[in-house]
Image: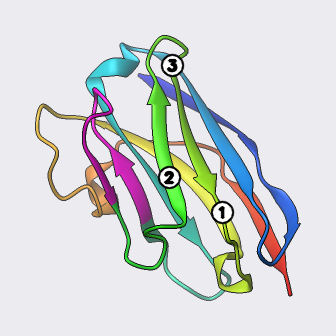
Amino acid sequence: QVQLVQSGGGLVQAGGSLRLSCAASGRVFSSYTMGWFRQSPGKEREFVAAIGWSGGRTYYADSVKGRFTISRDNAKNTVYLQMNSLNPADTAVYSCAAYFSPFFSRTYDRDQYDYWGQGTPVTVSS
């Protein structure tokens, strides 16, 4: 069992930056692929970014590529999402997620993920 607790988020002006954190407890964090997803009102949850167990592999949605950076610190059992150049279209509830697999594949598929954080709102004002 893995528990994920998120922090960060809030209100920021367009062009600004925020960093989300997701702290894991339970089973060995370094064995899990971690991802970030987001959901806006009236829309389905969508993939944002993923990172492999060692941090050596990452994958991003086209909409955030070049602006967002996912990283992890296995010593702290924490994954981060640094969000730069934010715009109002990035407004959503952001959730971290985890799944155990030796393979870094289909990381964009939310059905892959077994554990989810509580979600944290990010609002970008114009």
Q: Say which of marks 2 and 3 sits in front.
A: 2
Residue 51, percent from left and from top = 34, 43
| Residue under pointer 1 | 84
Magenta-tinted stretch: 48-59
Q: Secondary structure at mark 2?
A: strand
The answer to whether marks 1 and 2 mark residues whose Cβ atoms lie closer than 8 Å is: yes
Quick one: quadrant of the C terminus? bottom right
Q: CA distance from mark 1 to mark 2?
A: 8 Å
| Secondary structure state at the residue bearing disc 3 | loop
Q: CA distance from mark 2 to mark 3?
A: 17 Å
**x and y percentages locating residue 98 in the rendered image:** 39, 39
Q: Amino acid at mark 2?
A: Thr
- For the point 41% across and 22% down, which residue is it? 1
Marks 1 and 3 close (CB-CB < 8 Å):
no
Amino acid residing under circle 1:
Asn
Q: Is residue 79 above or below residue 47?
A: above
Residue at which label 3 appears: 77
The residue pinned by badge 2 equals 69
Of the two numbered discs 1 and 2 on the same chain, state the one appearing first in sequence: 2
**Mark 1, other Cα within 10 Å: few <14 / some 14–19 / many ≥20:** some
SS assignment at label 1: loop
| Residue 97 on the magenta segment | no
Residue type highlighted by circle 3? Asn
